[in-house]
Amino acid sequence: MSWQKELDELRRRESFADELGGADKVKRQRDGGRYTVRERVILMADEGTFHESGKIAGMAEYDANNELSKLTPSNFIFGKAMVNGRPVVIGGDDFTVRGGSADATIREKHNRCEEMANALRLPLIRMVEGSGGGGSVKTIETTGRANVPELEGWELLVENIGTVPRIALGLGSVAGLGAAHLAAAHYSVMLKEKSALFVAGPPVVARIGQVLSKNELGGYQIQLKSGAVDHAVDTEEEAFECARMFLSYLPNSVYELPARGPTDDDPNRTIDWLIDAIPRNVRKIYKMRPIVEALVDEGSFFEMGRQYGRSVITSFARLDGWPVALMASDPYSYGGCWTAATCKKVTKFLDLAETFHLPIVYLVDCPGFQIGLEAEQNGTIKEGVRAMSAMWQTKTPWCSIILRNCFGVAGAAHKSGGRYCTRYAWPSGRWGSLPLEGGIEAAYRAEIDAADDPKEKLGEIEHRLNKLRSPFRSAESFWIEEIVDPRQTRQLLCDFANTAAPLREPGTRSFTMRP
């Protein structure tokens, strides 16, 4: 006896799910320049590989004969797929069904999505739009009661942050729980003109006297500078490509190691112009990103969080094919000083590197922590201590190269202390408790004031001290292990990456990544 009748019923229910929130809602979504959730999944996944779970879950309506007359699907879909040939879990909000709010949500689907990624140890790509299954004031009317706020299943998300790569793409206006899902990711992307992120949207905020548009309240420029998200792009296709790129540097979970990529770029490539990269005038700034791009494998520089904590560049890259987590000072922002925001950025980045077993490379030009009233008001030293502690907690292989400045407590935070770390310095390296500039007048005030020509005396003292702080003097005492030719730096970094590769160990760490 055939079961075709039941299969026909299954297909009928699936056809309801394919209609999403209905033709009018789908048209509104597309008229707004946004794809539907099913279109997004098709664009994100390798062709034909998405296998959906719980497709026919939703709110059913039955007629007098107890036959299904209508099925409004859940406003969240998820399943397993392939992305660039590797397995992942994809979950996405359907804004066409009640704007993604709670009264169209089957919470078990959100939780099962997280469970699937955790149990199968697969990366999770979350496409967020709306409240992400969060509440709506209409929920009170539809349920007949007010709920006490709880985040059922949040423990699954926390577990995943320490276990699998979690990517969040903000593809529309995102608020409440949706905002939390977008922020709780290793890597997050917004659309420049079509998405916004806020705890509460403009109508709610207007009640406290702040009348703002979506972009003024939570547009990409606000959220990039706040550090709430890592990147913003113009199109959804670009967001999907960012997700693919980010994943390419990471393992499927902490129980694996990052895979080696292409080895087309000569590891012994000499970069002649680096001999002139650092100006002799210490007050003159220079561009760090071209240096980074020259040192790493061609085309492998993948920066995150560029607009936040800007005095340190954080990126993934490859060295002779091996993925690494690369930090580099940026003298164009506060001269490379660590601000409170920079410290927070460094803490998150180091946690990410340690969680997923990425060796760390740090190109150092740090004159210290930011000083002044603003720095004190922002609690810079407290955030600096947290960043230093994260650095000292790392066990992954570490290589630092001091390009120019390395001063004070923040300067000391250039490697994981208490264990061996590979370290080099360029001939342009300068270090100490604090820079001579500005410190001589305080330390030698009496001698300078007593001189017949104070200006000449100041120059004399500065000249004398500059000879004493030569990097070669430090090398004599083994305070710096090796001074190297900048042109040979790529060879040294590729050697580090090859040496570090067999030292990496899969598995969990004593601490895990926090959002």
Image (cartoon, grey):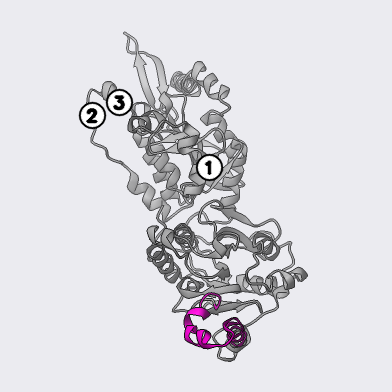
**Is residue 141 on the magenta stretch?**
no
Disc 1 versus disc 2: nearer the observer = 1
Q: Which badge, 1 or 2, comes first in the chain's sequence?
A: 2
**Percent from the top left, x then y, of residue 237?**
62, 37
- Magenta span: predominant SS is helix
Residue matched to label 1? 221
**Is residue 446 on the magenta stretch?**
yes
The residue range painted magenta reads 436-464
Distance from the alpha carbon under mark 1 to that under mark 2: 35 Å
In the image, residue 229 above or below residue 418: above
Residue 58 visible in image? yes
Q: Residues within 10 Å of mark 1 (few under 14, many from 20)?
A: some
Residue matched to label 2? 146
Task: Using the image as rendered, state which of residue 287 and residue 345 is in the foreground.
Answer: 287
- Contact, mark 3 vs mark 1 (Cβ under 8 Å): no
Quarter occupied by the N terminus: top left
Disc 3 versus disc 1: nearer the observer = 1
Q: Residue at x 56, y 46 (%)?
A: 243
In the image, residue 329 above or below residue 75: below
Query: Which amino acid, by three-letter code, is at mark 1?
Result: Gln
Q: Residue at x 55, y 91 (%)?
A: 477
Q: Secondary structure at mark 3?
A: helix
Q: Quadrant of residue 402?
A: bottom right
Q: Residue at x 57, y 24 (%)?
A: 30
Residue matched to label 3? 139
Q: Residue furthest bottom?
A: 476
Q: Residues within 10 Å of mark 2 (few under 14, many from 20)?
A: few
